[in-house]
Image (cartoon, grey):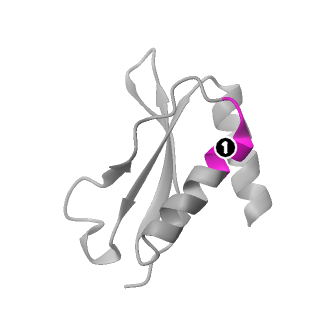
């Protein structure tokens, strides 16, 4: 639900992770790396801005899966990753 997504984004921000958005067509989602939407949102703390970017990505690529990633700057790896919108196959 949207409330669960909001809570996950709040957790991501509270942990100090850097949010980034990726998208890919469902037919290619398991074959290779996903395409990044813009650049990672370094220092972004406003959850509403992150949600607005997720929705803009979905509007631009309505058939694609859209996922949110939280990058951990210390370990230089993904700390959180989940699909926010499922595309149409």
Looking at this view, name the residue that lies furthest to the right: 3
Q: How many marks?
A: 1
User: Along the horizontal axis of the image, is 29 left or right of 18?
Assistant: left
Residue 19: image location, x then y, percent: 53, 37
User: How would you rate the neighbour count of disc 1 (Cα within 10 Å): few for under 14, some for 14-19, many for 20 or more?
Assistant: few
Query: Would you say the magenta stretch is mainly helix, strand or loop?
Result: helix
Q: Residue at x 71, y 41 (%)?
A: 47
Q: Does residue 86 sit above or below 42 in this rendering?
A: below
Q: Quadrant of the N terminus?
A: bottom right
Determine if the magenta segment contains residue 64.
no
What residue is disc 1 on?
Answer: 49
Looking at this view, name the residue that lies furthest to the top: 74
Residue 11: image location, x then y, percent: 70, 36
Q: Does residue 79 sit above or below 28 in this rendering?
A: above
Residue 79: image location, x then y, percent: 50, 33
User: Along the horizontal axis of the image, is 24 left or right of 43?
Assistant: left
Residue 51: image location, x then y, percent: 66, 51
Asked which secondary structure carries label 1, the reply is helix
Q: Does residue 47 sit above or below 67 in this rendering?
A: above
Q: Does residue 23 sit above or below 74 in this rendering?
A: below
User: Along the horizontal axis of the image, is 7 left or right of 85?
Assistant: right
In the rendered image, which quarter is residue 54 located in? bottom right
Span highlighted in magenta in the image: 45-51
Q: Residue at x 20, y 58 (%)?
A: 32
Q: Quadrant of the C terminus?
A: bottom left
User: Along the horizontal axis of the image, is 22 left or right of 5?
Assistant: left
């Amino acid at each position: 639900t949207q409330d669960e997504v909001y809570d996950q984004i709040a957790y991501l921000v509270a942990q100090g992770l850097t949010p980034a958005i990726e998208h890919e067509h469902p037919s290619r989602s398991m074959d290779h790396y996903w395409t990044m939407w813009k650049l990672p949102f370094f220092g972004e703390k406003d959850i509403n801005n992150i949600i607005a970017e997720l929705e803009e990505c979905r509007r631009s690529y309505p058939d694609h899966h859209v996922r949110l990633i939280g990058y951990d700057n210390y370990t230089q790896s993904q700390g959180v990753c989940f699909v926010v919108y499922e595309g149409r196959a």
